[in-house]
Amino acid sequence: MYTTMALVFTFGYLCIAFEHSLRVDKAASALLTAVLTWTVLVLGADAIIPALDVAAHGGDATHMVTSELRHHLGEIAEILFFLLGAMTIVELVDAHDGFTVITDRIKTTNRVRLLWLIGFITFFLSATLDNLTTTIVMISLLRKLIGDAEERWFYAGIVVIAANAGGAWSPIGDVTTTMLWIGNQISAGGIITQLFIPSLVCLLVPLIVLSFSMKGETARPALMESEDSRRNPTTAFERRLVFALGIGALLFVPVFKTLTHLPPYMGILLGLGLLWVTTEFIHRGKNDEDKHPLSVVGVLRRVDTPSVLFFLGILLAVSSLATAGHLTAAATALKDSLGNIYAINIAIGVLSSVVDNVPLVAGAMKMYPLVTPEMLATAGTQTAWLSHFVQDGHFWEMLAYCAGTGGSCLIIGSAAGVAAMGMERIDFMWYLKKISLLAFLGYMAGAMTYIGMISLG
């Protein structure tokens, strides 16, 4: 049964990795994998679960499995509610064309200047929103700024790198960083101060290299329809108000958690509630045709529900392996073979360019449990190793960086890359030849920067 669980998870993971070839949405594969792994676990609980763990739950292996499932589901629910709230806020801002507050201010046609401008806007916007949403917004912007499709691919490549780099140093910029933050492996202040410079280096290296090869001016696309001729149910005041409130609500979440010590999803739900009341108030005089698409009820249809179900499925599947002991065995094997937290994290980052970083981080969180000060005080000879796994420990910080930025090395390695590939029809081999090396150089430069900062500090 123990081996069967691993085989089921591996098969499900392959289905997720090859979803485009199989034409089966990864959310469906993740949900099936979750249910099947837990089913195998509960049916073979007596053979899989160690006797000591069963004894701690009254000697009933089945009861232990169901108790663990409820425990893991509670942790996962915090992540899912946070994501639902954040995604709804972003969709609400987008429905009001709030992001035009940024995009309408870009006027330059110089290729190099535009490259740096796009890179830095994406980098900081991703830290505020998330890398997937930022990529969608920036690709939409590029279509208004650059007419040639293949030239636009270079900028889209930088958007992918910048979005992943920007998401790595913010607790709300990437789902994996959010997972670590909600799990208390990292704090908002710690991740910002420790990863901002490595993440910036990760972006700067590709920008500098491309600046030597890109010259001249870029041609703007011909507009098929003037913006003035399009009917827009929102006013400039409404767009600015919703944009400011939406960004403010996202930025307030870490502050709310620090002040109240409540979980982050409570802060995001507070922001969503305030935005909901505000939009209902400012649109109260409009007819239903104009009001509905601008309401929370209307934008909920635009929220990427399959992605939420994917996170539910994959996190449940990973938690089943943690309960059965697979991840503990994997953690021991990595420690014995690599023996260095930096090497382990760099390997995880490179692997995240091939497979999804969500289950990788979820697995690492289960493989290496969070160490408390009390545990560290009684660690004895293991103190040096376990000190890397306290809150804001070097392992967790570098995991956030590596898992967040390593996916840029291949276009299928991150949600941002997949979004750019789908929107712009970017060829996999083109990205591999033109962007992958740049992304890898930036990734390694940032990782070495972090290790250097730790060594000097």
Image (tube, grey):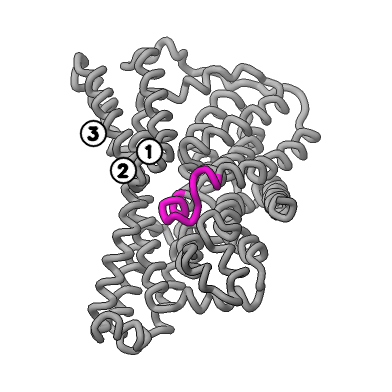
Magenta range is 178-191
What residue is disc 1 on? 256
Depth-wise, is mark 2 or mark 1 nearer the camera?
Answer: 1
The local secondary structure at tag 1 comes to helix
At horizontal 40% and vertical 58% (from top left) the residue drawn is: 26
Residue nearer the viewer, 49 or 216? 49
- The secondary structure that most of the magenta stretch takes on is helix
Q: Secondary structure at mark 3?
A: helix
Q: Which residue in the rendered view is the most extreme toward the right?
A: 212
| Residue 145 in view in this figure | yes
Q: Are marks 2 and 1 in contact (CB under 8 Å)?
A: yes
Q: Amino acid at mark 2?
A: Met
Residue 261 lies, in percent from the top left, at 36, 46
Residue under label 2:
266
- Graded by Cα atoms within 10 Å as few (under 14), some (14 to 19) or many (20 or more), the crowding at tag 2 reads some
The residue that label 3 is drawn on is 297
Say which of 226 and 43 sits in front.
43
Disc 1 to disc 3: CB gap under 8 Å: no
Q: Residues within 10 Å of mark 3 (few under 14, many from 20)?
A: few
- Callout 2: helix, strand or loop? helix
CA distance separating discs 2 and 3: 20 Å
Q: Identify residue type, mark 1.
A: Phe
Whether residue 271 appears in magenta in the rendering, the answer is: no
